[in-house]
Amino acid sequence: LGICSGYLPAGVAIVMLPAPLVMPLGGWRGLWLLTLAMLLLATAALWRSRPAYRIAAPGGRDPHPVAAAREALAQPEPWLLAAAMTCWTLQHYALIIWLPTFLHEQRDLASHLVALLSCLMVLANVPGNLIGGSLLQRHFHRGNLIAGANLATGLCGLGIFAEALPDLARYALCLLLSFIGGLVPASVLSSSASYART
């Protein structure tokens, strides 16, 4: 699940890299069309490989879907995990949106450099996810990883928006926020095994 949680930042980075090349040709619409083409290719590949996927027959009596949903929603842990994931997601997406805008409009960097620096920031999240999965396999407590990562990313955010810091330090904090934040999705997704029955 640490590997699985790394797919999103890797996918975002893959789209960010060609953006400066596509934008002059078709603007944001061209980028959307490129993304759509990639989605259609992925869909076609999945459709072609469907014979390889087998759904296991149910091994017992499953509870009624409404009863299962009620049982799951009555537990506090999934709500807490959802809140932790929401906090992390808001931080990361705010940074993904803010950084390119800041670099382009405030620092007047060239589009290809903005895309590269933004892409590196997003990619820093991938090893964080992998390390999160590895730490969980080594029996680090999931709650400690989530709380520690959210605290660290919050502190990084304070530094990122502190105009007194030099730009290089602020960018380094962007990389650190993205990297450390990878512990959160890996930890939250790994907890699904605890609640899979419901």
Image (cartoon, rainbow, N blue to C red):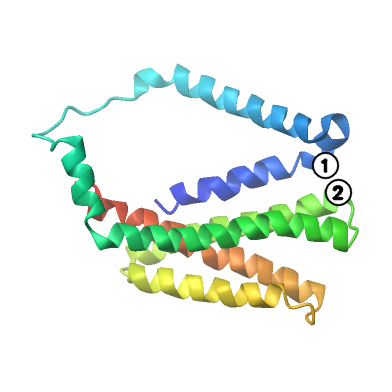
Q: Residue furthest left?
A: 61
**Position of residue 69 in the picture relative to residue 88 (left or right):** left
Residue 69 in the image, given as x and y percentages of width and height: 23, 44
Residue 133 appears in the picture as rendered = no
Amino acid bearing label 2: Ser
Which element type, helix, strand or loop, lies under badge 2? Answer: helix
Front one among 51 and 88: 88
Q: Earlier in the sequence, mark 2 or mark 1?
A: 1
Question: Residue 154 sits in which quadrant?
Answer: bottom right
Which element type, helix, strand or loop, lies under badge 1? Answer: helix
Tell me which residue sits at (37%, 74%) in the image. 144
Q: Residue furthest bottom?
A: 164
Q: Residues within 10 Å of mark 1 (few under 14, many from 20)?
A: some
Residue 198 in the image, given as x and y percentages of width and height: 21, 47
**Position of residue 12 in the picture relative to residue 76 (left or right):** right
Q: Which mark is residue 20?
A: 1
**Position of residue 89 in the picture relative to residue 187 (left or right):** right
Image label count: 2
Q: Which mark is residue 111?
A: 2
Tell me which residue sits at (54%, 46%) in the image. 8
Residue at mark 2 to residue at mark 1: CA–CA distance: 6 Å
Q: Is residue 162 above or below residue 120?
A: below
The reply to whether callout 2 and callout 1 are in contact (CB within 8 Å) is: yes
Q: Is residue 3 above or below residue 142?
A: above
Amino acid bearing label 1: Pro
Residue 147 appears in the picture as rendered = yes
Residue 80 in the image, given as x and y percentages of width and height: 35, 63
**Position of residue 25 in the picture relative to residue 154 (left or right):** right
